Every structure is written in structure tokens, then in C-alpha cells.
């Protein structure tokens, strides 16, 4: 009571500062409580309510493969989309061996090649199926940190085709089936390079394609939410996969760099909720920390870090060339 009387007795500017501070504290408290609920307490949705089938691109390794297993664990039949028949069949056998009741179809689709042929193969495979979940996971990055003027033109054109054009084409193919039934969930795998940090030097094209994925997802979220379709962009940071094997000396798993299975378990629980989602707790904590730092610091830090990656890959190429010459 005395505290309130003291505050009210102060000049008006003092009261304004107090109210602004109280508002900021309230917003922070709500944010923290919501984050704790989202990451630890919020239950995952029953994905079969969207439909009995899930389509996953890039399911033969890394996050895509782990997500395919998690979807099967949740009772979803699978349509596995990839460019290597042998690898697709191998993953199919492994999933069927673990989840015998799950039906699986494979679709040959080279996302970096003729998209028209791949789309037609996919359209035939999903015809008549109640595809409830689509996971656009497949993606590629530069083989190593590279200044844009040094980048191979074919490599970044291929990146644009896989990370951007194929995502749009596949979504355009599957979405009409969901619209007919007024339900569905679309998950596009983005990247922290386009959301968490202001820039991603030496990986410019990759970051730009993932920025498309984020904006594409958010716009579709607004377009189709009223029609029963949940669109989401999931934002992973570093996950221990083949794509990041060139950055780290050896594969490792930790709170901030989880393995693909750990990430997939968290990712499944987030499907159908927020339009932008960061499922892994360690990634979310890093995001919060980075957001507190000024842009010039984050830009400088990323440039130094990626220049280091560039040097690591240069040395590896030199050792490989020496080894090849010796043989």
C-alpha cells in the first residue's frame, strides 16, 4: 500500500517509466511461460486426423529419414519421395521391419532434375489417397563456405531448384487433395540462416532459398488456415547430419546440436501449431540469446565462423588430393 502511494506521489514521468517497465516484465513473463508450455508441456496432435498418409521428401538420411520413422510411429502410412531407388527401398524395408502395419509407397523424384517428370510420378502415387501431412524436407547447401563470385553457377542453380522450385511444385501438387477434404498439415523445413540471424555470409544462396521457404510458409498459413490446413515452417539450427558433417570434425550430439532422431521427436510434436516453429529446445535457447545481440555483432561473428569453415574444407580438400596423388 505504501509502495503504491509512493509511486503515485512521484512526477508523471516516473509513473510512465514504472508502467512501461511493468508492461515489459509482463510481456517477458508471458513469453517465458508460453515457451515452457510449447517446448515441454504442449501435447502433439493426432496426425491421423489430417489423413492416413504422409508424404516426405528427402527421407533417405538425416532429418527426413528420422521424420519418416516418427510419422510411422504415429501410425501414418508413408509416401517416400527421393532420387535414389535403392536408398528409398532400404528405408522402406527398415520402417516396415519396425512398423509392420504401415503401408509405404516410394516415388522416384530428382528434385534437381526435370521437375515435370517428378511431379507426374508424385501425382500418380498420391491419386485417391487421403494425404494428410506433407513434409518438404529435402534441401541442399553449398558444399563449403564460398564467396558468391567464386561459386559454381550450376551448383547454386541446382540449390534454387531443390530448395525453392521443388518445394513450391510439390506443395502445389499435394495441396488440392487437402483442400477437397478441408484438412491437412504442410511442414516446410527452413533454416536458422534466414530467420535467426540477420545474414549468413559465404552461404548467401542457401540462406536466400530458405528465406523463401519461411515467407512462403507464413503466407500459405494465412491463405489456408480458414480452410482447415495448417502450414508451418520449422526452423532447425545445426543438427548432426551429413549436411553439417563438413562443418564439424566429427558427428556429435548435444543440447544445441541434437542428432536427427532427437530433433524429429520434437518436430513431430509441433506439427499443426505455430506458423514458424523451432522444435528443439537447445535451438530455441540459442535463438533467444542471439536475438539479444546487435546485428553488427552477429554479422561479424557469422563471417568469422564461416571463414573458419571455409579454411577447414580447404585443408580437407588438400589432404584428399594428396592422398589421391599418392595412390
Image (tube, rainbow, N blue to C red):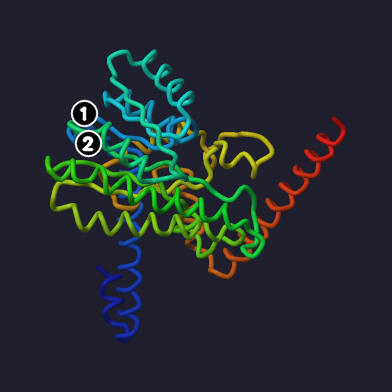
Question: 295 or 222, which lies in front?
Answer: 222
Who's the residue at 34% across and 40% down the image? 135
Who's the residue at 26% across and 23% down the image? 75
Alpha-carbon neighbours of circle 2 within 10 Å: few (<14), some, or many (≥20)?
Answer: many
In the rendered image, the quadrant that contains the C terminus is top right
Mark 2, secondary structure of its residue = strand
Location of residue 25 with respect to 36 vertically, above or below: below
Residue at which label 1 appears: 52
Instruction: From the viewer's perspective, tell me whether residue 95 is left or right of residue 239.
Output: left
Coordinates of residue 278 in the picture (x, y in percent): 40, 47
Mark 1, secondary structure of its residue = loop
Q: Quadrant of residue 45?
A: top left
Coordinates of residue 31 in the picture (x, y in percent): 33, 55
Coordinates of residue 34 in the picture (x, y in percent): 30, 50
Question: 181 or 120, which lies in front?
Answer: 120
Instruction: From the viewer's perspective, tell me whether residue 72 is left or right of residue 175.
Output: right
Residue at which label 2 appears: 132
Instruction: From the viewer's perspective, tell me whether residue 61 is left or right of residue 43.
Output: right
Amino acid at each position: 500500500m505504501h509502495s503504491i502511494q509512493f509511486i503515485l506521489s512521484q512526477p508523471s514521468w516516473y509513473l510512465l517509466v514504472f508502467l512501461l517497465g511493468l508492461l515489459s516484465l509482463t510481456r517477458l513473463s508471458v513469453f517465458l511461460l508460453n515457451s515452457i508450455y510449447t517446448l515441454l508441456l504442449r501435447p502433439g496432435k493426432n496426425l491421423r486426423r489430417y489423413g492416413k498418409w504422409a508424404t516426405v521428401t528427402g527421407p533417405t538420411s538425416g532429418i527426413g529419414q528420422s521424420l519418416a520413422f516418427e510419422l510411422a510411429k504415429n501410425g501414418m502410412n508413408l509416401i517416400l519421395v527421393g532420387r535414389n531407388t535403392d536408398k528409398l527401398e532400404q528405408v522402406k524395408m527398415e520402417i516396415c521391419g519396425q512398423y509392420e502395419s504401415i503401408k509405404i509407397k516410394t516415388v522416384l523424384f530428382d528434385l534437381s532434375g526435370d521437375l515435370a517428370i517428378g511431379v507426374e510420378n508424385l501425382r500418380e502415387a498420391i491419386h485417391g489417397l487421403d494425404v494428410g501431412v506433407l513434409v518438404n524436407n529435402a534441401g541442399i547447401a553449398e558444399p563449403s563456405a564460398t564467396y558468391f563470385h567464386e561459386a559454381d553457377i550450376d551448383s547454386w542453380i541446382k540449390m534454387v531448384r531443390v530448395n525453392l522450385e521443388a518445394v513450391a511444385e510439390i506443395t502445389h501438387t499435394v495441396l488440392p487433395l487437402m483442400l477437397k477434404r478441408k484438412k491437412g498439415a504442410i511442414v516446410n523445413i527452413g533454416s536458422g540462416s534466414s530467420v535467426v540471424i540477420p545474414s549468413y555470409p559465404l552461404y548467401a544462396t542457401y540462406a536466400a532459398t530458405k528465406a523463401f521457404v519461411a515467407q512462403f510458409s507464413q503466407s500459405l498459413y494465412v491463405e489456408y488456415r480458414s480452410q482447415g490446413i495448417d502450414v508451418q515452417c520449422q526452423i532447425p539450427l545445426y543438427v548432426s547430419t551429413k549436411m553439417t558433417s563438413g562443418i564439424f570434425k566429427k558427428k556429435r550430439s548435444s543440447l544445441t546440436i541434437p542428432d536427427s532422431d532427437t530433433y524429429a521427436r520434437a518436430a513431430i510434436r509441433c506439427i499443426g501449431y505455430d506458423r514458424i516453429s523451432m522444435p528443439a529446445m537447445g535451438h530455441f535457447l540459442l535463438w533467444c540469446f542471439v536475438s539479444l545481440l546487435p546485428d553488427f555483432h552477429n554479422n561479424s561473428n557469422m563471417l568469422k565462423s564461416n571463414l573458419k569453415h571455409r579454411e577447414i574444407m580447404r585443408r580437407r580438400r588438400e589432404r584428399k588430393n594428396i592422398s589421391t596423388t599418392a595412390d
